[in-house]
Image (tube, rainbow, N blue to C red):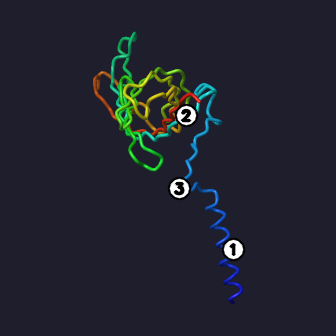
Amino acid sequence: MNTICTSTLAIASSLLVAACGGMPSSGSPKAPMFTQDTLPDAVKVPGGHRVALETVGVGDITYECRAKAGTAGAFEWVFVGPKADLNSRGGARLGTYFGPPATWMASDGSAITGAQLAVSPNGAGNIPLQLVKANPATGSGAMSGMAYVQRVATRGGVAPAMACDGSVLGRKEVVRYQADYVFWKAA
């Protein structure tokens, strides 16, 4: 009986040590978890850049029912803007994302805007993946030196499914969304 208990304890201890062996120690820097290997080419950051910051954006996108430009009697939901918290993978608030114009602001006050370079579909019910070329940062801090922003792992955020017609013209609807925002600097 003691032999079985001792053997079981030894196996369990070995498994625990093996499992913990791959974990970073508190003194070593944590390598970025993100890889763009599985992303469509259109939204990949060009070579010569490195991941500087990974965030999880959680918030809302506002849409408004408006007359469709150039089409008499037609209406559509139009993107008005986002408002989201930018959190670390552990849930700590690092900043905000809002617009227009699309602005990523770190808690230290530094901020960037940017120009959309490309989008790629990410499944029904999800806003597309996106690649943005960052403008120079305002303020010094976490956003300084950022060259690109990728929006990946999107969930939700598409225009409302409810009808947009003359009876609701001007109505605003807010939809929930989540997306990872990955910030890149020159290598």
Relative image position of residue 4 (x, y in whole percent):
70, 84
Q: Is residue 94 depicted above or below 135 in this figure?
A: below
Q: How many marks?
A: 3
Kind of residue at badge 2: Asn
Q: In the picture, residue 111 is in which quadrant?
A: top left
> Which numbered dot is residue 163?
none
Whichever of callouts 3 and 1 sits on the residue coming sooner in the sequence is 1
Query: Which residue is labeled 1 in the image?
Result: 11
Relative image position of residue 60 (x, y in whole percent):
37, 36
- Camera-side mark, 1 or 2: 1
Q: In the picture, residue 162 is in which quadrant?
A: top left
Kind of residue at badge 3: Ser
Whichever of callouts 3 and 2 sits on the residue coming sooner in the sequence is 3
Kind of residue at badge 1: Ile
> Which numbered dot is residue 26?
3
Query: Which residue is labeled 2 in the image?
Result: 122
